[in-house]
């Protein structure tokens, strides 16, 4: 199917997210506005106004009632999805680079930027899922990262751990109750910024993307690297597809170098790899700037990508996507059927 | 009172130098002068004669000695022993040391008569080398090195699968690989910093040449050990003779060889030279030359035209017997190997000569039984004389054929690989000098009297031309007028030519087969075995096309058009491909594969290579950071006779059956390995996933197991309600009469 082009933003996209039902896409961009779109036709549902600076991150709770955002105006905000009402604003000394709800939606974490004498931190708030309720100002947990600045973070299954990716290419595992550092692993090349961390549907493993041109899948409990996907371009994002065993990687020449290279040279393509065999199976072109984020429909029926070029491209997978199987997978399926 | 000019004391001016005693200074700085013995030579090997006939002998040798210089009056001293006989030697004094040196150079080892050979040496040399103690009195026989088996330099030809090797230069690494078609090339050897600028194969593939600031090294054998080393500081370019016997090295900087800058194997003679010609077998220099200044010419507006250096400057005859260099506009110097002496001690004067090319094979002209090599040259219009193309035979230096041409602005010489034809591509300008057109003058070298055929049907400028190797067909690319100041290069047209088929297999006149218009192509690459040709656009910004043509395509009978039959060609475009950023094309020596390269020498976009088969099917593509070179290892000419080759061709079907089976078997095992690996990966993954799911179930992770959605009561009893909404957009009523 032809991709749907969402051209409501005026500046580079920074994050796009599907809600758990997959019917709505939330997008944030450097133009200070949060947009909500219908995923099946690309119609805009509404916008959320209030942020005073570029937006870096967005997340929606599992019931699609609450929306969290964070940005360069040093605030993290909570909105009501339905009405667009601003429910809560938390102020910080530096900008918010990443927000994420836990699987049950009762906790919200934020990653703060390291700047002007402030170390990078990961903060956690208890969230009341009722949109009418007063949200707390009290941080239930505050982790200060002294060694290396965290860039991305998220909750593991059952909110056991908080996993964070750092600018030095390491991944840390924290106890989500006590904030204690349990383990730190050099998952990517040293001093290669980790740009994204996305979870598998059951949050037992996650994929990280890095400037070292690779994406890797690691297990949440052991931090063991299970798979490595090597590309020829710095990566900004990586997502795991449900239903089919694929991963989608996005990236391209760094935005500042783009003017000196042709679109072809920039490698602004979404790349599909087989999750288990780590082999490239396809590419999707379209953006004329690097892909800043790729998100997969929770039911695995499509994906969308937000680019430095200011567009969100929404793709719905066609039949061949679902039909494609490696010979050994077909064997496996046959065996399953025979049982 | 201050000293003014007027009252300076007069005495100071009358200063007498002789009054001062310099002896101490003179002693300290005395230069030990030559004792004047440099003008003396010693002559040995003279006949022993009685005293009375000594004068006669002196007179006799003086005649020889005076041929190189002037011997001083009474300059010959021939000692006589007690028996009143001469001793067979003499001391001779020349007027100047330079004459003595000339005498040693030219007269040493000149025969006087049947029994006597004159040996001439410098007196100082006798003193220097022959002084007591310098030479051991006892004879020690020279040590004969025990025979050491060297490596087999052509072992790669014995590959069981008949694969070809290629060298790849990427980043700082140089590696030699076996070509494995679709599969990743199999490494043979891979070394960091093997070369400093580029790598080059010798023409028959025996050696791999690496270039260093100190010189050139040749590598080969199974272990890729160093075979030879030619020290030439600052070397830029290397050229082999066709049979790998000799190597020419060139540096743009003149060599500096003296006591302070000793270079192994080079002597003072090489000082100031740019070219060195080496003997590959011994590793020693044969002769060195300086770069000739190309006469600077000016273009129409009077600006000096920057001439590109011709490389190779020293051109080899096909059998390594001669090497020749042209002095543009004047002459061609032909040197004989292995002595590197100028043929007949003179250069061949050809006034105005612009270019020359040796025949790439030993020509077999009709009715010529003796040994000969040919070269072709051309001269431009000089005064009222027309431009000329000539064929000269060596060693007799006879001109066997010339042809006069008019209105020539440039000419290029293209030999066919068997030396059967030479095509002279003549760019001719109209009388007004405004438009250009190209004529092809094809010399049929092997036919009696060397007839010339002219193809003058081409209306545009030919920018590229190539003969089919070992064949009689050719391809050329033409372009129209180049519009001034446009960034877009003009469109080109590709034309194919083939000779008429005559009875008895003779080659008839050349005819135009087909022209393909509106192309961007600029390069022609024939398969080394002929028949197939790749026409491409190289180093272009917009176009990266590759067209794979077959010139002997077997058309189904009913499709064969009438009138096509009498031409020796049947043209078919087999495939078209595109390789972004392509800079080079390389056919493998067997004509089975084509490698296309996007080299980091030219640009930094998507460096890497593509591998096609001869039909233009893409087998493999790989992009490699800073990929610079891919060069196939050449093969020496086949040892099979024509009959044996024909036999193989006849039975090709049987052979290919075996090869297909081998390929299939290999593929199956490779596939099997890949499938095994995948199966293992899949099993591991599924097992791990299962353990995770179990763990989640134990922990009671309901949301996680539901794919991130909070399962609710409603969901379980959920019922899908299909709602059909009909919207009436417009309703109109019409009355039908």
Image: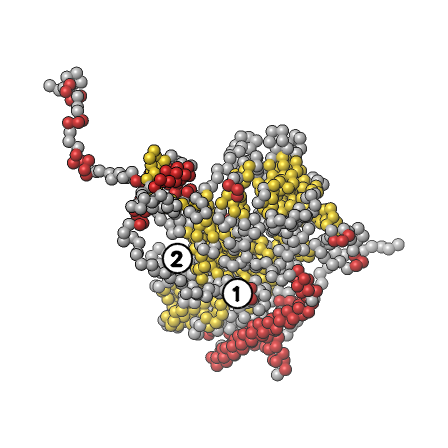
Disc 1 designates what residue?
A: B155
Residue A201 in percent (x, y) is at 52, 71
Q: Chain of mark 2?
A: A
- Quarter of the C terminus of chain B within the rendering: bottom right
Residue B294 shows up from this direction: yes
Residue A212 in percent (x, y) is at 45, 61
Name the mark nearer the viewer: 2 or 1: 1
Residue B372 in percent (x, y) is at 60, 48
Q: How is the image coloured?
A: secondary structure
Work out whether residue A302 or residue B312 is closer to the camera in this orientation and state it: B312
Q: Quadrant of residue B33?
A: top left
Disc 2 designates what residue?
A: A94
Residue B121 in percent (x, y) is at 36, 45
Using residue B720 as the reference point, say whether residue B691 is left or right of it.
left
Q: Which type of secondary structure does the marked residue at label 2 adopt?
A: loop
- Quarter of the N terminus of chain B within the rendering: top left
> From this viewpoint, which residue is outermost toward the right?
B737
Work out whether residue B223 or residue A191 is closer to the camera in this orientation and state it: B223
Residue A152's place in the image compared with B244, above or below, is below
Work out whether residue A209 or residue A127 is closer to the camera in this orientation and state it: A209
Q: Chain of mark 1?
A: B
3D distance between C-alphas at marks 2 and 1: 68 Å
């Amino acid at each position: 199917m032809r991709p749907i082009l969402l051209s409501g933003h005026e500046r580079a996209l920074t994050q796009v997210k599907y809600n758990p039902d997959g019917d709505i896409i939330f997008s944030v961009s450097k133009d200070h506005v949060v947009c909500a779109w219908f995923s099946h036709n690309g119609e805009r549902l509404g916008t959320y106004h209030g942020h005073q600076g570029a937006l870096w991150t967005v997340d929606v709770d599992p019931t699609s009632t609450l929306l969290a955002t964070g940005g360069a105006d040093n605030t993290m905000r909570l909105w009501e999805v339905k009405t667009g009402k601003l429910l809560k604003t938390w102020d910080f000394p530096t900008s918010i680079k990443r927000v994420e709800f836990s699987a049950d939606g009762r906790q919200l974490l934020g990653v703060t930027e390291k700047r002007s004498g402030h170390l990078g931190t990961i903060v956690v708030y208890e969230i009341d899922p009722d949109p009418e309720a007063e949200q707390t100002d009290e941080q239930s947990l505050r982790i200060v990262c002294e060694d290396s600045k965290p860039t991305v973070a998220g909750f593991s299954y059952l909110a056991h751990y908080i996993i964070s990716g750092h600018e030095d290419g390491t991944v840390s595992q924290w106890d989500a109750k006590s904030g204690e550092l349990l383990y730190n692993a050099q998952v990517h090349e040293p001093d290669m910024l980790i740009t994204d961390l996305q979870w598998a549907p059951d949050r037992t493993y996650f994929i990280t993307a890095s400037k070292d041109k690779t994406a890797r899948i690691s297990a949440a409990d052991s931090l063991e690297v299970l798979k490595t996907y090597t590309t020829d371009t710095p990566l900004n994002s990586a997502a795991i597809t449900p239903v089919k065993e694929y991963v989608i990687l996005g990236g391209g020449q760094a935005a500042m170098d783009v003017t000196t290279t042709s679109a072809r040279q920039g490698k602004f393509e979404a790349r599909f790899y087989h999750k288990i065999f780590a082999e490239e199976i396809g590419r999707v072109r379209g953006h004329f700037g690097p892909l800043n984020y790729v998100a997969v429909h929770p039911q695995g029926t499509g994906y969308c990508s937000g680019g430095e070029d200011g567009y969100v491209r929404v793709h719905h997978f066609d039949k061949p996507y679902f039909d494609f199987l490696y010979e050994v997978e077909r064997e496996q399926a046959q065996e399953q059927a025979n049982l | 009172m201050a000293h003014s000019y007027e009252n300076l004391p007069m005495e100071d001016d009358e200063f007498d130098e002789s009054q001062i005693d310099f002896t101490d200074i003179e002693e300290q700085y005395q230069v030990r002068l030559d004792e004047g013995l440099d003008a003396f030579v010693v002559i040995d090997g003279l006949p022993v004669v009685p005293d009375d006939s000594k004068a006669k002998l002196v007179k006799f040798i003086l005649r020889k000695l005076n041929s190189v210089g002037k011997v001083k009056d009474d300059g010959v001293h021939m000692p006589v022993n007690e028996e009143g006989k001469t001793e067979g030697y003499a001391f001779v004094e020349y007027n100047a040391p330079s004459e003595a040196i000339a005498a040693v150079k030219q007269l040493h080892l000149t025969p006087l008569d049947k029994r006597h050979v004159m040996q001439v040496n410098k007196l100082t040399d006798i003193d220097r080398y022959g002084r007591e103690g310098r030479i051991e009195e006892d004879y020690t026989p020279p040590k004969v090195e025990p025979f050491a088996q060297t490596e087999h330099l052509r072992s790669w030809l014995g590959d069981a699968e008949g694969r070809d090797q290629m060298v790849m230069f990427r980043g700082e690494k140089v590696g030699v690989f076996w070509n494995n078609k679709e599969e990743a090339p199999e490494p043979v050897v891979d070394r960091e910093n093997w070369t400093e600028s580029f790598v080059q194969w010798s023409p028959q593939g025996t050696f791999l040449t690496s270039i260093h600031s100190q010189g050139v090294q040749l590598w080969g054998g199974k272990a890729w050990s160093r075979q030879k080393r030619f020290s030439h500081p600052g070397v830029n370019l290397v050229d082999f003779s066709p049979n790998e016997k000799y190597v020419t090295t060139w540096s743009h900087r003149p060599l500096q060889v003296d006591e302070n800058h000793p270079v192994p194997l080079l002597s003072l003679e090489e000082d100031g030279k740019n070219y060195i010609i080496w003997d590959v077998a011994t590793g020693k220099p044969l002769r060195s030359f300086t770069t000739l200044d190309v006469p600077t010419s000016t273009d129409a507006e009077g600006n000096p035209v920057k001439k590109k250096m011709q490389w190779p400057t020293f051109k080899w005859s096909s059998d390594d017997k001669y090497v020749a260099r042209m002095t543009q506009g004047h002459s061609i110097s032909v040197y004989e190997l292995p002595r590197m002496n100028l043929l007949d001690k003179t250069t061949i004067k050809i006034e105005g000569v612009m270019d020359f090319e040796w025949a790439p094979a030993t020509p077999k002209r009709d009715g010529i039984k003796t040994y000969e090599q040919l070269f072709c040259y051309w001269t431009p219009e000089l005064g009222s004389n027309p431009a000329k193309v000539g064929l000269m035979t060596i060693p007799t230096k006879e001109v066997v054929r010339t042809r006069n041409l008019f209105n020539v602005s440039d000419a290029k010489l293209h030999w066919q690989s068997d030396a059967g034809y030479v095509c002279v591509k003549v760019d001719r300008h109209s009388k007004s000098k405004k438009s250009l057109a190209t004529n092809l003058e094809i010399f049929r070298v092997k036919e009696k009297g060397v007839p010339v055929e002219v193809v003058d049907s081409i209306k545009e400028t030919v920018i590229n031309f190539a003969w089919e190797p070992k064949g009689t067909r050719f391809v050329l690319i033409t372009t129209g007028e180049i519009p001034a100041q446009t960034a877009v290069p003009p469109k080109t047209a590709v034309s194919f030519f083939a000779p008429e088929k005559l009875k008895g297999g003779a080659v008839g006149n050349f005819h135009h087969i087909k022209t393909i218009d509106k192309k961007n192509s600029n390069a022609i690459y024939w398969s080394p075995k002929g028949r197939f040709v790749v026409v491409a656009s190289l180093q272009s910004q917009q176009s990266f096309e590759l067209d794979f043509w077959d010139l002997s395509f077997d058309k189904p009978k009913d499709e064969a058009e009438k009138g096509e039959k009498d031409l020796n060609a049947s043209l078919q475009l087999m495939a078209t491909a595109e390789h972004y950023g392509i800079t080079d094309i390389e056919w493998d020596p067997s004509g089975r594969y084509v490698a296309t390269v996007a080299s980091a020498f030219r640009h930094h976009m998507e460096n890497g290579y593509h591998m096609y088969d001869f039909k233009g099917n893409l087998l493999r593509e790989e992009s490699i950071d800073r990929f610079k070179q891919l060069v196939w290892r050449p093969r020496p000419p086949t040892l099979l006779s024509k009959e044996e080759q024909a036999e193989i061709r006849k039975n090709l079907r049987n052979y290919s059956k075996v090869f297909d089976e081998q390929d299939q078997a290999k593929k199956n095992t490779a596939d099997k390995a890949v499938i095994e690996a995948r199966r293992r990966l899949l099993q591991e993954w599924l097992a791990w996933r299962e353990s995770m799911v179990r763990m989640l179930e134990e922990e009671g992770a309901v949301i996680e197991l539901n794919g991130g959605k909070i399962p609710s009561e409603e969901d379980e009893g959920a019922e899908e309600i299909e709602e059909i909404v009909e919207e009436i957009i417009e309703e109109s009523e019409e009355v039908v009469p």
